[in-house]
Structure formats: C-alpha cells, structure tokens
Image (spheres, rainbow, N blue to C red):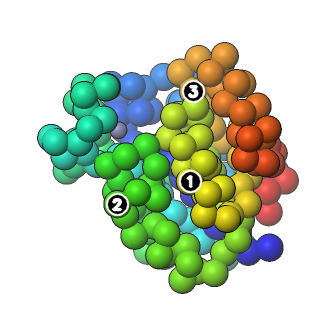
Amino acid sequence: MKKVLIVVDMINDFVTGKFGSERARNIVPNVCALVTKARKHGVPVIFLCDAHNATDRELGIWGEHAMKGSKGSEIIPELKPEKNDIVIEKQWYSAFVDTQLPEILTQMNVDTLIFTGVSTDICVQNNVASAYFSGYNTIVPRDCTASIDEESYEYSLKYMKNIFGTEISSSDRVF
Ligand SMILES: [Zn+2]
C-alpha cells in the first residue's frame, strides 16, 4: 500500500475566518502532528485549498469565500507547507476537477489516500467520492476532520464508510 496524506481546506476562511468554527480549530493540533509524522515517514503531503475566482459557481451557493490571492484562502499559519509538500488550488469542492491532482497522484503511483481537514461533509466527502471513482482506497482519521456541526460530521463519516468503503480510522493508526 502506498499512501499520501491530503489536507483539505485548512485555510484561514474555514478555520478562523468566515466559515471558521471551534470544531475546525480543535483538530489543528492533530492535523499538524499527522503532517509532521508523514514528512518523517516519507509520506507525501498534499494540501488542497479553495482559491476562488469571481465567476466560480460555488459562490452562488455560499457567497464570497476563500478568494484566490486573499488571506482567507491561505493555509493556516500552524500548517505552513514545507518545500516537498504539494499545494493545489481548487475551484470546486473536489480537487479532482480542473486541477493537476489526478495527474500528480498517477505520477506518485499511490493507491491509498488519507484525507484530513474540513468540512467533513462537504469538501472532504466530495474528494473521497472522487478518489473512489478514480479507483483509490480512502482513509479518514476521525480526529483530523471536522464539520460545523456534530450531526453532519457523524453522518458524513458513516456515509463515506458505507458508500465508498472508506476506512474511518484515527491519526495514530494511519501509518
Ligand atoms: Zn469554496
């Protein structure tokens, strides 16, 4: 099994900004620790970050957020990417749409994607769905992901497990 660690939308607007929440802030230390562990183990780290253009369809649903080049779309300071990490800007919930991600994953020759970040029920779940459609195994450590509310979080974890065969795990068990 060759794994990659993916950090979804741990950007200012979703942690401390417009759509920030206490639940998102609570997972920051866990995600930081897992990213550090991944680098130590030679597991590649990929950050997927909302970076919207004014014409993006999503803005019609959520209003302006994480605009490309803004502070809100920057990765939170605690998770500052290092030189071997990959950062991918995305315009849709799923980074498998209109980005280099599918190609990068193919080149890495990985088969298992570990997803962390926010929101569990929106961008994490939609990336897990895309990963499933592309033939990857998926793992979600529950202590490294969060939704705005508990109910959406629990439902989403159950949904990914039942529908995409996602392994719902914890950060001390993923690698
Ligand atoms: Zn967005």
Q: Earlier in the sequence, mark 2 or mark 1?
A: 2
Q: Quadrant of the C terminus?
A: bottom right
Horizontal and vertical percent position of residue 19:
39, 25
| 3D distance between C-alphas at marks 1 and 3 | 19 Å
Residue that badge 1 annotates = 130
Mark 1 crowdedness (10 Å alpha carbons): few <14, some 14-19, many ≥20: some
Judge whether residue 53 can be spotted in this image: yes
Q: Earlier in the sequence, mark 1 or mark 3?
A: 1
Residue that badge 2 annotates = 98
Residue type at numbered disc 2: Asp
Horizontal and vertical percent position of residue 165:
79, 48
Mark 3 crowdedness (10 Å alpha carbons): few <14, some 14-19, many ≥20: many
User: Quarter-wise, where is residue 160 in the image?
Assistant: top right
Label 1 with label 3: CB-CB less than 8 Å: no
Horizontal and vertical percent position of residue 51:
29, 48
Secondary structure of the residue carrying numbered label 3: loop
Q: Earlier in the sequence, mark 3 or mark 2?
A: 2
Q: Which mark is residue 147?
A: 3
Query: Considering only vertical position in the picture, is 160 above or below 151?
Result: below
